[in-house]
Amino acid sequence: MHLHDLLDTLFTRLVWTSAQAVLLIALVAALIRLAPRLSAALRCMLWWLVGAQLLIGLCWPAPLSLRLLPAAAPTATTTMTPSTPDLSLAADAAATSANTYAPRPVDTTAANATATPPSHPLPISTPTALLALWLAGLLLQSAWAIRHGRRSRRLLATSTPCRDTALEAQCRAQAQRLGLRRAPALRMSCDIDSPHVTGLRRPVILLPADAGFSPAEAAMAVAHELAHLRRGDLWLGWIPALAQRLFFFHPLATRAMREYALCREAACDALVLQQAGVAAGAYGQLLLRMGVSAPMHPGLAGASPTFRILKRRLTMLQQPSDTPRGVTFWLPVLLVALAGVLPWRVTARPTTDTPAASHTQARPSAATKPSAYVHATAHADAHAVSGRHIHIDTDTHDHARDGFALIDRDSMIVQGAGVDLDHARSLHDSHDSALWVRRGGKAWVIHDPATLKAARDAYAPVVALSREQGRLAGKQGELAGRQAGLASQQAAAASHRADLAGHQADLAARRAARVAREAARRSSEQAELQARRAALDAERASLQASPATADASMAEHARRIAELDAQRKALDTEQVARDKAARQADQKAMQAERAELQRERAHMQKSDAPSQARIQARQHELAEQQKDLGTQQRALSERQKAATAEAQQRVQKLLDQAIARGIAKPVQMD
């Protein structure tokens, strides 16, 4: 397979898979909306199927054909202008097309666009440019994944074994209760702020060393990570992760994979509540305490990546859900898998046998992808004589009763079946101008110059109209490429808006987490100061209650009371200073975050609205131009149809005259 063919196949699969993913995502979203009590595990599996569909559509070699379109016409007219001296290769391509393209519709617009390029062709086609951008984005995604993988290995290398024997015993008991063959190792790390589970062959649960979990909270955190292992999320999660990396440009695919991650965490939450017998309120307090934390790749974190995800997880803890089992669980999964996971294409129904005299020319269409037949014919352009014109009009069935072929050194016109094309190619290889005639089982060859000239004159208008159609098709293809470029700009703008919204949500989540941490720190400091103050008050009261027996003792007594009063005053001053500094730091951080959000919002409003307006105006302009070209194509098609019918009538008369005059030499049919 040539590189051009490989790139074309890859681009086609990306486009079709992206379009099919939109339908599948809409189906899953509608199913979840219509059945709000679906369990988190079932929702997770449905969103996982979207990731599987994206990967299968990109790798599947032969998509399923849904024959929903009407059958194609039995004949087709293809015009091309070759460019090097080997016409036998052009005839080979035409013969291949006559034998192979019958079950598929032929797009003459695409063929003409290939055969008659615009006067100023672009150095790089639009699909090639889009694929280059996709590969560049894929390299960035790969670099990001490699960096996070190295971070994961570094965290494992710097972690220390867990010394809490009670927690390890609870981990082994919970793993046995969940049906795991062996309990994962527990390790402590100072570089994380929430529990993680990582490792495909030998899973390891990493716990934050300075989190300060109570024994009950640590047990719930470990139970959540064990739930990931019980569900096989470390293995299954690679499918959505790869799909999100490969289709990073697809906003709906990104949203679907985020929904999968949310439902995966919610399913683990539900499994913890069900298997460990934990109260929903206590588990929700643990989620709030862990707050917001970015997940470690390739691993699974117990904390939520954003504040919005944390809020949705807490909401799902309070909502009742059905827990289907067996057929009830797998039936929606099978329905969604059959409906949209396997790649499919909408194609035309196969044609039926028609009489030989029925020759219908395929009408051009501006937005149809070239078929395999068109590609085979166009491939012969590079091997044909520069400046020559080859017109091929073939019947798609080998049962055509009549046929003829007009062969010159610089042109060839064939009408009929594959046998006519084979004899025309043989005559052309002999470099002899001739007219091949077949009626039923008899055939003749005519070399009379006057008859040949009359036949060429009869088909001259058809050839001219075909060239004009090729020129219009080239313009339509160029406009389609420009429209695709504008659509790509719109998609990039939408992705930019989504990134900004995500950035704003992350800022808000970080602020909420910081406020929570500061509140906890202030509460701890206030408790410490109050404890010290209470100790001073107790010591002072004890000194005041004990009697002094001597003057020296009385002086020491008074000095100690004064010292305690000074320490109490210093504690009060320290608390006031700490509170003031904390308030100032909070205000400064809030002002900085608010300014950053305002700058992001202003930049988005300033740059997005004019750009979108320009793109929409340009799209409307290109659509009008496409409409005008389509009108011209339809008019040319009608003219060519009439010219073809007239040319066929004139040629039939010439054949009758040649046979009557005896200048048609009989040929033995094989």
Image: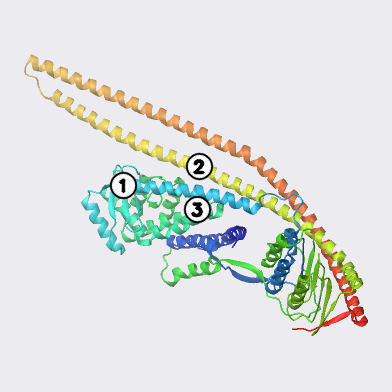
Indicate the quadrant containing the C terminus: top left, top right, bottom left or bottom right: bottom right
Distance from the alpha carbon under mark 2 to that under mark 3: 19 Å
SS for dot 1: helix
Give how far across and how far down residue 522 sits, in percent: 33, 34
Crowding around mark 3 (Cα neighbors within 10 Å: few <14, some 14 to 19, many 20+) is many
Distance from the alpha carbon under mark 1 to that under mark 3: 27 Å
Give how far across and how far down residue 458 sits, in percent: 89, 69
Quarter-wise, where is residue 174 in the image? bottom left
**Circle 2 sits on which residue?**
503
Indicate the quadrant containing the N terminus: top left, top right, bottom left or bottom right: bottom right
Which three-letter amino acid code belongs to the residue tagged 1? Ala
Label 2 or label 1, whichever lies nearer to me, is 1
Q: Are marks 2 and 1 in contact (CB under 8 Å)?
A: no
SS for dot 2: helix
As displayed, is residue 661 above or below residue 282? below
Give how far across and how far down residue 25 sits, in percent: 55, 59
Crowding around mark 2 (Cα neighbors within 10 Å: few <14, some 14 to 19, many 20+) is some
Farthest residue, direction top? 551
Which three-letter amino acid code belongs to the residue tagged 2? His
Quarter-wise, where is residue 539 in the image? top left
For the residue pair 228 and 129, the one nearer the viewer reads as 129
As displayed, is residue 289 above or below residue 450? above
Which badge, 1 or 3, is on the more N-terminal residue? Answer: 1
Label 2 or label 3, whichever lies nearer to me, is 3
**Circle 1 sits on which residue?**
157
For the residue pair 399 and 615, the one nearer the viewer reads as 399
SS for dot 3: helix
**Circle 3 sits on which residue?**
245
Which three-letter amino acid code belongs to the residue tagged 3? Arg
For the residue pair 232 and 111, the one nearer the viewer reads as 111
Crowding around mark 1 (Cα neighbors within 10 Å: few <14, some 14 to 19, many 20+) is few
**Residue positioned 31% across, 62% down in the render:** 178
